Amino acid sequence: MLIYTKIADIQAFLNAKRNSGQQIGFVPTMGALHQGHISLIKQAQQQGNLTICSIFVNPTQFNDKSDLERYPRTPEKDSALLEAANCDVLFMPGVEEMYPKEGKPNFDFGYLDKILEGAHRQGHFNGVAQVVKRFFEILTPHQAFFGSKDYQQVLIVKALVKQMSSPIDIVSCPILREPDGLAMSSRNVLLSPAERLIAGTIPKLMAEAKKRIHIYGIANAKDYVKQTCEAIPQIKLDYYDVCHPDTLISYADTEKPDYAIALIALFVGKIRLIDNL
Ligand code: PAF
């Protein structure tokens, strides 16, 4: 696996590959890699791409400084995992390389970056769009692969490529789960053993809420999630909502939709987790 830290070097390498007709697949990450990330690499490879993985803990998408400081950083382990997965290129730029100029661009995604995650993490999607746009401009991949645990992020990135009039194909990949159902996340390693057990109940909570949506409607499911979370002192619920999967517009509490996505964000101790079903 080739490792680059400088934009000029990776661009020279990619230009040569592109000129020889090679298709390029890109998997952006913030490191602390797990099998969910590796499944994105595999997906990129299966589509015949030369596969680039980036590791960059993007400071501009963290609304909470302590969350940024606490974010796990395991570069040696990440590199070994990527090597074992036959990833072709690892790109690990520093902050100076990514953001040589001061200032933050302002994106406009309409309502999409103001609801759900956007409402609870001020400026988060602006930071995500900033870094993803920068990577897309540097690497100009044919395809880019994102995990659907970050469902709203996938819609934001799709809106971004539209705004950029970019032909990059955004591929949304399924959530990978631990044996107890917990969605794989880099943040899971930050949970204490007791918190990890509690986090393992999130998928069961989501499954029960889904049943209740079908039988009783959304209001009942929301009450159930709220009350269950309130009964567990280590959990603080940020939101649980049931939305249209294409637009993320909330269904009314009185509805019993067949085509819907339920999204949750909660803290277990100090660690913020998200999931969807
Ligand atoms: O999903 C993530 O890990 C990040 O938001 C991303 C897409 C790598 C941008 O920093």
Image (spheres, grey):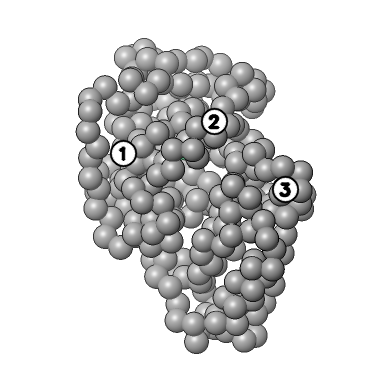
Q: What element carries label 3?
A: helix
Q: Is mark 2 within 8 Å of ligand 1?
A: no
The quadrant in which residue 265 appears is: bottom right
Callout in the foreground (2, 3): 3
> In the rendering, which numbered label is found on residue 165?
none
Question: The residue under label 3 is which amino acid type?
Answer: Arg
- Residue found at x 71% / y 49%: 195
- Say which quadrant the N terminus sits in: top right
* Circle 1: residue type: Gln
> Is residue 161 at all visible to an observer of this figure?
yes
Q: Which of 197 and 26 is in front in this view?
A: 197
Query: Residue 261 in the image: x percent, y percent?
Result: 52, 67
At mark 2, the secondary structure is: loop
Q: How crowded is mark 2: few (under 14 residues within 10 Å), some or many (20 or more)?
A: many
The residue that label 3 is drawn on is 196
Q: Which mark is residue 130?
A: 1
In the displayed orientation, state which residue is furthest to the front: 233
Which residue is the site of mark 2? 31
Q: Tell whether circle 1 marks a residue whose Cβ is less than 8 angstroms from ligand 1.
A: no
Question: Relative to residue 253, is residue 60 depicted above or below?
Answer: above
Lower sequence index among marks 3 and 1: 1
The one nearer the camera, 51 or 182, is: 182
Residue at 58% of width from left, 54% of height from top?
267
